[in-house]
Image: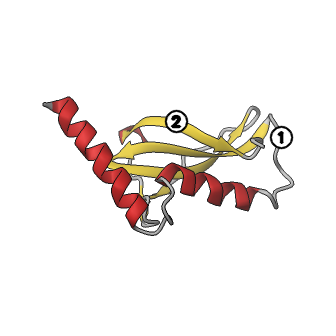
Amino acid sequence: MLKFTLVLFTATAFFTCKKNGTSGKSCDDYWIAKKKEEWKALSSCSPTFKHYLGKGIYQGTALYYTSINCVACDVAPPEYGMTCKGDTIRVADWNEVKDTKTLAACTDH
């Protein structure tokens, strides 16, 4: 039953995102394209210092966030993320963000 609920939730979130403001793209594709466009203007992008787009689940909602991956830096997790629709969500406890993954980085071509 849990697998069915998760699949249903994922499918519902996907179709909701496609319908609400992403012009037919999946949410991931929308945010990847948006961030890649923003990163074109960056001069601070290298394999040792790069901006990236991540995705996770926070309180049952898909959360898109940007951060920096820096070998020599101590970078705190982002305080805010965005939903597929573009609503801002404040992350009170980053440990509650599950299933995180990197979707894109400024070094991607």
Q: Quadrant of residue 99?
A: top left
What residue sits right under mark 2 in the picture? 101
Picture quarter with the N terminus: top left
- Residue drawn at (40%, 67%) of the image: 20
Does residue 96 appear left or right of residue 44 in this picture? left
Q: Earlier in the sequence, mark 2 or mark 1?
A: 1
Specify the farthest residue to the front: 24
Query: Whole-percent x and y of residue 88?
Result: 44, 65
Q: Secondary structure at mark 2?
A: strand
Residue 105 visible? The answer is yes
As drawn, the label of residue 7 is: none
Foreground pick, 62 / 94: 62
Q: In the figure, 56 relative to 79: above or below? A: above
Q: Residues within 10 Å of mark 1 (few under 14, many from 20)?
A: few
Foreground pick, 56 / 26: 26
Q: In the figure, 29 relative to 89: above or below? A: above
As drawn, the label of residue 46 is: 1
How many angstroms separate mark 2 from mark 1 (CA)? 20 Å
Query: Whole-percent x and y of residue 106?
Result: 74, 47
Q: Quadrant of residue 70?
A: top right
